[in-house]
Amino acid sequence: MAGHDISWLSAAETAVAIKTKQVSPVEVVHAYLERIERFDGLLHAYITVMREEALAAARQAEQTVLRGGDLGPLFGVPVAVKDQFWTRGILTTNGSRAYRDFVPDADATVITRLQQAGTILLGKLNLSELAMGGTQEPPWGIPRNPWDLERTPGESSSGSGVALAAHLCAASVGEDTGGSGRGPASYCSAVGLRPTFTRVSRYGMTPMCWYLDTAAPMTKTVQDCALILGAIAGYDPRDPFTSRRPVPDYTACFGRGLRGIRIGLIRELDEDAGMHPEVKQAIHNAVEVLRQQGAEVREVSIPLVALAGAIFVGVADTEGAGARDDILQTRAAELDRASRTRLQAAALVPAKVYNRALKARVLLRQQFLEALRQVDVLASATAPAPPPKHTALTAPFVDADDVRSRFFFRRAYTGCYALTALPAISIPCGFTADNLPIGLQLGAGPFAEDLLLGVAHAYEQATPWHTRRAPGIEE
Amino acid sequence: MALSKEEWCRELARLVGIPLMEGEVAEVAERFESLMRELERLTQLDLAHIQPVLVFPEEEA
């Protein structure tokens, strides 16, 4: 199998090709390393490429294949992770000069579990500084969206989105505080899942926001997403918030069809005046596909979702400032100007206002759970517009209205699931006339990832979007 | 005498122990004002009987 043929495979297909000895783990790793060598100088997906470590792991995996035995569904698959996950002995920058020398002495639980599943770690991926978004001058280069190099791949798991769209890894794990995994997935035509808050251990994942951060599987296909979640989910004594619920087979709902599934289009997000017309049309088309597959589709109302952007920033930025208090007090000059001024402003928010945001979060959760008594799955766009140009993202704010539209408005779409601790997934659902990706977001009740993945898989199998390749990355 | 928003911001930062960079006080003040204005929208909600939680209990689901 030729190198470029290998890199087009999904993670699940790669594992099958290895298991059936069509290709060796060493050949697979070489294929990805060659693509990284060729394209990453332009794309800036990686901060650290673990070439020697990955090749050593691949040679070891090759011996395991030759010995035979029960190889798991991700065995030998090259993965890359957001550089927010601690890797023992390997630089972990969190996208910030403030961490340019940070070499952890332990692996994050997510890293350990990926290794236990037999995956091979290719490297650490670029991100917005401190997983926040809005970085003006990323220290390790501006990650470029393979679908249009002038446009952002989304934030903050930007490198994960780029690496998947350019096939520089077979699968990735990013992180999602308020959409940091689903946003880049949407902008890069990939799959991104935010699990239920307590589903995956956060041990060794540098915090952006103590009570919102989750690890986020990001993949080429829904099946890969289910496999990665199955590998990393579950109780971890080093993260006291992780659930003791057993981890199900997340592919179990595949192939069951959608008959009897109730899907609710969130009216307040669908009717928002800021929604781009091509995005709105793509979402309506996607919902129609779900209906044709047997789902019952209706509108649902969640009035408070209109304020979710404000609630999210009220909770996340103030907690983020608290989590970075040491840096703000003594090393603020090491931060990018946008991160620094954003955190400094958030540090000044009075406790009364923060508590109000926390209360509003509870009310929002009540409204989501009420909607989820009427339907099984919620639907909306992942982002109200296609990926903007880098220059639009980093331009100084003009006035308060500009702040509202660029900073608060778009956060309602993904931030609502973070605030309510519910699972949500973004899957490709089309392209604009300019060939820019559009993402469909589906959400569900607590721990209903299996249902969510089943619906997403049914949609994916009925549509061609996940098979389209970004221009300029073919051999 | 009323403080300007920059002076107000500088004083708040001093109280919480966050040093601001001299050329960026106006930017921090602008961001802070925008943040507070947006969060002001939450005062329209009736939150009197709601108790905030940090992590939602599993049994509630």
Image: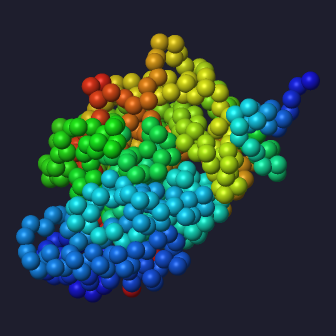
Position of A292 with respect to A334 (left or right) is left
Taking the view exactly as shown, the residue that stands out farthest to the front is A105
> Residue at the spot x=33%, y=27% of the render?
B57
> Residue at the spot x=52%, y=79% of the render?
A41
Position of A182 with respect to A401 (left or right) is left
Position of A444 with respect to A431 (left or right) is left
Residue A7 lies, in percent from the top left, at: 31, 77
> Residue at the spot x=37%, y=48% of the render?
A203
> In this view of the protein, which residue sits in the foreground, A400 or A270?
A400
Does B53 appear above or below A112?
above
Q: Count numbered badges in the picture.
A: 0
Name the quarter where the C terminus of chain A is drawn: bottom left
Q: Residue A239 falls in which quadrant of the image?
A: top left
Q: Residue A227 falls in which quadrant of the image?
A: bottom left
Name the quarter where the N terminus of chain A is drawn: bottom left
> In this view of the protein, which residue sits in the foreground, B20 or A23?
B20
> In this view of the protein, which residue sits in the foreground, A475 or B11?
B11
Q: Give the colour scheme shown.
A: rainbow
Taking the view exactly as shown, the residue that stands out farthest to the top is B49
| Residue A388 in view, yes or no | no
Residue A27 lies, in percent from the top left, at: 26, 83
Residue A266 lies, in percent from the top left, at: 41, 36
Does A238 appear above or below A62?
above
Does A475 appear above or below A254?
below
> Residue at the spot x=43%, y=74% of the render?
A49
Residue A39 lies, in percent from the top left, at: 47, 80
| Residue A61 in view, yes or no | yes
